[in-house]
Amino acid sequence: MTQQIDIKSLYPEELAEQLGAEGYPKFRAKQICDWLNKGVVEFSQMNNIPRDLREFLNTRYYISVATIEKKFVSRYDKTVKYLFSLNDGEMVEAVVMHYHHGVSMCISTQVGCKMGCTFCATGKSGFSRDLTASEMLAQIEAAQKDLSLRIANIVLMGMGEPLDNFDNVVRFIKLVSSDGGLQIGMRHITLSTCGIVPKIYELAEQKLSINLAVSLHAPNDAIRSRTMPVAKAYPMDMLLKACRDYFDSTGRRVTFEYALISGVNDSDSHARELAQKLSGMNCHVNLIPVNAVEGTAYKKSDLQRQQSFVHILTAKGIAATIRRTLGSDINASCGQLKRNHIKEGGQ
Ligand code: SAH
Ligand code: SF4
């Protein structure tokens, strides 16, 4: 038997094309997509679709779902962390956060990650496979249904490197923001990358009005390549040039993520070096006290160090803020939940 097609990763016009090629009316595609958007997970429930077409759908296609395996709710700030299982039993994490400007969800783009950043729980667990567009959508749908709310913003900051799964991620962004889809506008979507330079250029060519975040985490290549192997392939000068070019071609301001790690990248001279590298750029620096991950010796910088770092940047004209930590009681940093689940004897 030929492999079944992932129906929720198709654009409606692709489904219409495929149905047409099999002799079914193309307008059925819209009806089917409406059911899928309502969260129906069985073709047999699509009661305005003729039986023969439903049977055809059942043999030719499958519907992706994200099933909640574990759920943790923070006592402090209503942050919810999920461990989802996918159709093939693989597991990914996602987090729902309540901000003043609405509900944001951090979703995964891969099962694991190939990039191997030393401070990251996902990086330590290795890589299993890419997620399909539908599996990214399924995480949002599952959370919206479980919490009875609407997700307003999406950040691609869960497990995985989005630009290492480029085609599926772009497809997801187009599907999730489309009129017939979940209608989360591109301006409400942030893609975070560890800095795969050629892919940043490819992304710019797509002309998507999403926000780009780049994980910098160091003021120079020597420090960066100690924690982020990707820095050896794409040095900082090249990366920062790609960010400048990205702004020039899209008009979208780039955000830099900088995890403050005690004694590694958080001194005043590191802050000055960073300010110099970023000077003249239209950007924002998000400082994040690093989340301690088991098996690493990294510790977050103390409050005074954090404040000194942010002051130096802002005094030198670089917009910078310290990100509020949400869900600190539920391991809200991605990758940790899955590692604990495996240790407990889960899959
Ligand atoms: N692969 C992408 C997106 C997923 S990681 C990227 O690296 O940008 C999302 C963010 O979490 C990145 O900025 C990453 O560097 C950061 N991160 C990973 N582990 C962390 C930790 N232990 N503490 C703080 N931030 C961490
Ligand atoms: Fe991958 Fe991002 Fe983690 Fe690095 S920080 S290992 S790129 S998920």
Image (cartoon, helix red, strand yellow):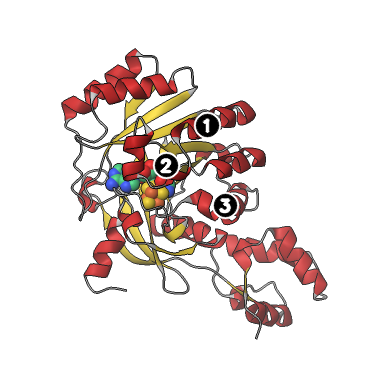
Cα–Cα gap, marks 1 and 2: 15 Å
Alpha-carbon neighbours of circle 1 within 10 Å: few (<14), some, or many (≥20)? many
SS under mark 3: helix
Q: Residue at x 55, y 33 (%)?
A: 242
Amino acid type for the residue under numbered disc 1 = Cys
Q: Nearer the viewer, residue 156 or 240?
A: 240
Q: Is residue 313 above or below residue 68?
A: above
Q: Residue 67 at x, y = what percent?
A: 41, 68
Q: Residue 248 at x, y = what percent?
A: 61, 26
Q: Nearer the viewer, residue 214 or 91?
A: 214
Circle number at residue 65:
none
User: Which residue is the site of mark 1?
Assistant: 243
Determine if residue 105 is in view. no
User: Which residue is the site of mark 2?
Assistant: 231
Determine if residue 151 is in view. yes
SS under mark 1: helix
| First-in-chain label (1 vs 3) | 3
Q: Is residue 27 above or below residue 308?
A: below
Q: Residue at x 38, y 28 (%)?
A: 285
Please give left or right for residue 207 compared with residue 282 in the image: right
User: Which residue is the site of mark 3?
Assistant: 166
SS under mark 2: helix
Alpha-carbon neighbours of circle 2 within 10 Å: few (<14), some, or many (≥20)? many
